[in-house]
Amino acid sequence: MTLYLKDASFLDWQSLEIKQTDLAVEEGSQGVMSFLTAVPTKDELNSQDRILNCSGKLVTKSFGCGHHHIYSTLARGMPAPPRIPTNFIEVLEYVWWRVDKRLDRDMIEASALAAAMHMAKHGVTFCVDHHSSPYAIEGSLETIARAFEKIGLGHLLCYEISCRDGQGCMEAGLAETDAYLSSGRKGHVGLHASFTVDDDLLENSVELARKHGTGLHVHVAEAPADQEHCLKTYGKRVVQRFHEFGALESPHTILGHCVFLDDNEKKLLRESPVWVVQNVESNQNNNVGATGYTGLTGNVMLGTDGMHSDMLRSAKAAYLVGQNTEGVSPDQMYERFRNVHRFIKTMGAEGDGDNNLVILDYNTPTEITSENFTGHFIYGLESNHVLSVIAQGKVIVEDRRITSVDEAEILAYAREQGLRLWKKLEDNISPQSSLRTLRRS
Ligand SMILES: [Zn+2]
């Protein structure tokens, strides 16, 4: 099947060159996009072919998210925690570790479907996710993968393994990761963070990543507590510890946050091929602080950390916070916003080729050119300009409506699962070893 985009203002996401053109977009994970001088006439079209009129619309590559937690989708509007968290560790204990322990297969599926739908409607067609459901680990990654594919999204998934819920959950996390990656799926060996991962688990995870030719996906120095625990327990800082275990050797490794690093850790990152993901809104929400990323490494991309599914919003937030921390420019922020595609390419993952496009209904009161585009990107473009979205050559959003599934049906299913989750929050589940792990600090 070929999709023809007629009369588009096409913006090349790398050169920022804008040209008036018709486009032919082939379907499939390997599908390509090509420029045409004219779309075929009706008689020349095959029965499956379609023409979309893009007159007056800006067409460019769709977006990607470098760090998400779809498992947090059903938390929106949930009952308040038993106590108000006063620091980062309490946010985990009172909020996220209460939610993730109560997730079951249906809730995970509903979370993934709803999050994928939101991503699609915001122009995001590829997601790097970090999943946690300690009492529903087995098969969780395949459930998410299928949900993403039902909506039409490409993905790199991982399960967040840690020691916080005891030996059984830790082993189940390793087994789930091994099974998922052995099945031919691409993804990561996910770890929660240094303060919930002991030396044995860190060593086994690096080994598992090597076995599958992939990297780790782990939170690093999101709050000072991570560094304090590492110094007290291991006598060294987090990045140094990871470096000594070989955790920084892969260009596929993703370190989330990296807010609290010293000069030596920054040097280790600069000398390694790993990627760093910036999630400023989540950092603000947890009141952990902010940092600049200029000069840390060229490999910085943007994520939402489960806060939402709108990457244009993440880029704006990172730009605004970055004025105070590093004086970042619109050009630099655009590069970080687009770096996710470079990362996906290094992973050799399918589903982020040139046949992933967003059609923007962007009526600007000022001229838009190659030279000033990043100014429009920061100050003008918003996800409500996303009119239609093409993922792997298929139209998955058309005129702001999801076409791949029945949106109302999925939202109803998610609400039903959300209510089940909220009801389960009243159940008393022992935090098990999570408190013991932390109390050691
Ligand atoms: Zn995260």
Image (spheres, grey):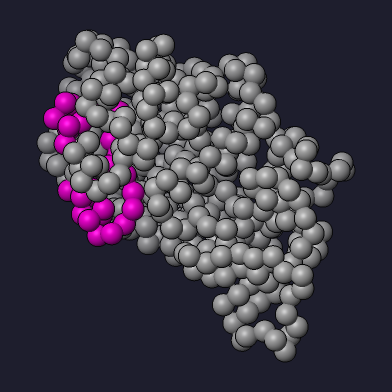
Q: Foreground residue, 378 or 403?
A: 378
Q: Residue at x 57, y 58 (%)?
A: 354
Q: Foreground residue, 393 or 94?
A: 393
Report the side of 147 relative to 32 (left or right).
left
Q: Is residue 345 above or below residue 232?
A: below
The answer to if 203 sits in the magenta stretch is yes
Q: Is residue 74 above or below residue 59?
A: above
Residue 294: percent from the left, percent from the top? 55, 22
Residue 404 shows in this picture: no
Residue 441: percent from the left, percent from the top? 23, 14
Residue 261: percent from the left, percent from the top? 40, 16
Give the quarter of the image for residue 54.
bottom right
Q: Is residue 236 above or below residue 165?
A: above
The answer to if 171 sits in the magenta stretch is no
Q: Residue at x 70, y 74 (%)?
A: 51
Residue 114: percent from the left, percent from the top? 48, 54
Q: Residue at x 31, y 29 (%)?
A: 248
Report the side of 139 relative to 284 (left or right).
left
Q: Foreground residue, 435 or 324?
A: 324
Give the quarter of the image for residue 226.
top left
Residue 131 shows in this picture: yes
Q: Which residues are magenta?
A: 175-204
* Quarter of the image where the N terminus is located: bottom right
> Farthest residue toward the bottom?
43
Report the side of 234 relative to 188 (left or right).
left
Report the side of 225 relative to 319 (left or right).
left
Q: Residue at x 53, y 29 (%)?
A: 281
Q: How many marks?
A: 0
